[in-house]
Amino acid sequence: MTSTDTVTAPTSKRTPQPRTYLMCRPEHFTVSYRINPWMEPANPTDTARAVEQWQSLYDTYVSLGHTIELIDPIPGLPDMVYTANGGFIIDGTAYGASFTYPERQPEGPAFMQWFADHGFDVVEPKNINEGEGDFLLVGDTILAGTGFRSTTDSHKELADLYGREVLSLTLTNPNFYHLDTAISVLDPLTGDRDANIAYLPSAFDEASLALLEERYPNAIHVSEEDSRILGLNSISDGYNVVIAKRATGFEAQLRERGYNPIGVDLSELLLGGGGVKCCTLELRR
């Protein structure tokens, strides 16, 4: 099924739901190492520009009525701006992150300390996982990515912790190394066949693709062109969808479905392999 086969509810029936997000100002952002295909330390980065672009994303969320909480950036941890990787939270319980690469491993304890200091019940992980980068909540179901970062053992740990269905999905393209670079959850509060998600079919192995097609028959299939600028790395409140400004094809697909896409420019942060969703961790209390 293509993205144009089914047109769902009109704009008037989509209702935005205020959310609470955790963000981190990229005061120390740079690309000094290479842990994903997007990163090239030889290319210069502009920290001031990264902060300016991040501020635009922050201001967009505030203008939409969302609540933003901040974790302090730590010198020497330039990727802390990508807060989505810092954990996964449902009903006030925070499952901490355990990063794959040594360069980011100190972030795990820093985020868990922030969660504890702000009233969350913190569960220290036993298995490698990179938080909401690889875990996406759709209704009562958790979509869980593996293949490059989070292990399948972390999927079982997640299921045992939250008592929810966890669907494991295997990523096969290193450019889409986290699940949130290949799937966008458009209707976070609904699940199964009545939920809209968007995804890049070629990012998954055959078994995972079959599962997605069966579970979400009305999903939007996003182009390689839009996906390569992390257009899928987006945030939706059920009506407003904040996306990469250059993902114009995805923008048109969203409007066709009755969503209100809002483009932001995070091109500087893209140099580190992150986009809108990477900079945004939902705090579900």
Image (cartoon, grey):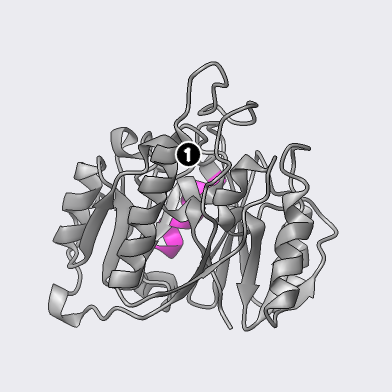
Secondary structure, magenta segment, majority class: helix
Q: Position of residue 188 (x, y in %)?
A: 42, 72
Please check the rendered image and state whether residue 210 is part of the magenta-colored stretch, yes or no: yes
Q: Secondary structure at mark 1?
A: helix
Q: Which residue is mark 1?
A: 203
Q: Position of residue 77 (x, y in %)?
A: 67, 43
Task: For label 1, count other residues whose C-alpha is less than 10 Å away and answer few (under 14), some (14-19) or many (20+).
Answer: many
- Which quadrant of the figure has residue 266? top left
Name the foreground residue: 22 vs 207: 22
Q: Quadrant of the C terminus?
A: bottom right
Name the foreground residue: 203 vs 91: 91
Please check the rendered image and state whether residue 144 is part of the magenta-colored stretch, yes or no: no
Name the amino acid type tagged 1: Ala
Q: Position of residue 222 (x, y in %)?
A: 31, 45
When the figure is inspected, residue 102 is found, relative to residue 285, above or below; the finding is: above
- Which quadrant of the figure has residue 28? top right
Left or right of residue 29: residue 16: left
How many numbered discs sit on the rendered protein? 1
Left or right of residue 260: residue 185: right
Name the foreground residue: 222 vs 54: 54
